[in-house]
Amino acid sequence: MQTAPTVSLLVEFTYDRLAWSILSTPGGDIVPEIVARGFVSEHTTPHADHDLVRATLEHATALAAAVEDVVDVVVFNQPYRKLLAGMPSYPLLNVLPLSRINYRDQQRLSALEDLRQCLRRARPVAGSVIDVATDGAYHPHRGGGAYGWLACNGEHSFGSARVRSALDAELVAILSAVRAQPSGCTVRVSTDSRDAIAIIDGRGADARWRPSSLRLADLILLQRRRLTVRLRWVKGHAGDAMNDGADRLARLARTGGHWGTPSHPQQTIAAGIVNDARGRNSAV
């Protein structure tokens, strides 16, 4: 029996990344074909940055609709499925759970694997313990503020930070690292900033704390509603492989911003930094 042609838009979200693939099924026994795919990173608002999600889905849905009139959206993450189902401005979206997709298992798994290759990193699961090293960099005239962090599983991030102090850069690094982890896990954060630990844990209250620093500390404390955050001080520039890696990522972001280094070379350098840090750490 001939089946109607369908197009499926498969979407997978992580905390700060979104990947999608469009699969066209002409009908019958013809294997679905991936006709387009896309990848967006660095949306860091909890659960979803709605503007980014909407813009991405609008683009992907338009492409899918150009292939066929029927669009099924298969979302692999329950909270986002509910979000998409509540988008009345997208009448083409027929949001389905993974179990409803009408492909043979091997084809479904291949499509999911394509998305996961696009995400390019393994995600920790709730309940796990994740060790993360963080660092901030700041120079008022050469690149401003920047942050970097590196997890034991190789997950990492770095970028510029609109801050006016070294402490705020350190806090942005911690906040970015903690935000990226799944709910229910324990995050053990290593930092070489005693001030960052003091302001987050509420010890050593000092009139020197800027309002901006207090706000960042509050944002970090709010993350403790969904996961456990443990802070540990390590001496900077003392041979700790993970701390050195985070420091190099932060400096890469600051100097790259100052000199206008393109994103691709920065990502290549960052990958080398991460591999070096993890190699040194495993050798300890």
Image (cartoon, helix red, strand yellow):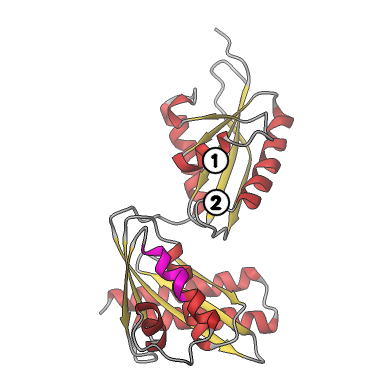
**Nearer to me, 276 or 50:** 50
Toward which corner of the image does residue 70 lie, by quadrant?
top right
The residue labelled by disc 1 is: 83
**Nearer to me, 282 or 124:** 124
Q: Position of residue 222 (x, y in %)?
A: 42, 65
Q: Determine whether, in the image, residue 130 is placed left or right of residue 104.
A: left
Q: Position of residue 266 (x, y in %)?
A: 59, 73
The residue labelled by disc 2 is: 48
Which stretch appears magenta? Answer: 217-224
Tell me the tag on residue 211: none
Which tag, 1 or 2, sits closer to the chain's start?
2
Please tell me which residue is depicted at 37% across the width and 58% down the height of the picture: 226
Q: Position of residue 193 (x, y in %)?
A: 40, 87
Q: Are marks 1 and 2 in contact (CB under 8 Å)?
A: yes
Badge 2 density bin: few <14, some 14–19, many ≥20, Cα 10 Å = many
Q: Is residue 89 magenta?
A: no
SS for callout 2? loop
149 is higher (above) or lower (below) than 193: above
Amino acid type, mark 2? Ala
Amino acid type, mark 1? Leu
- Quick check: can you spot residue 77? no
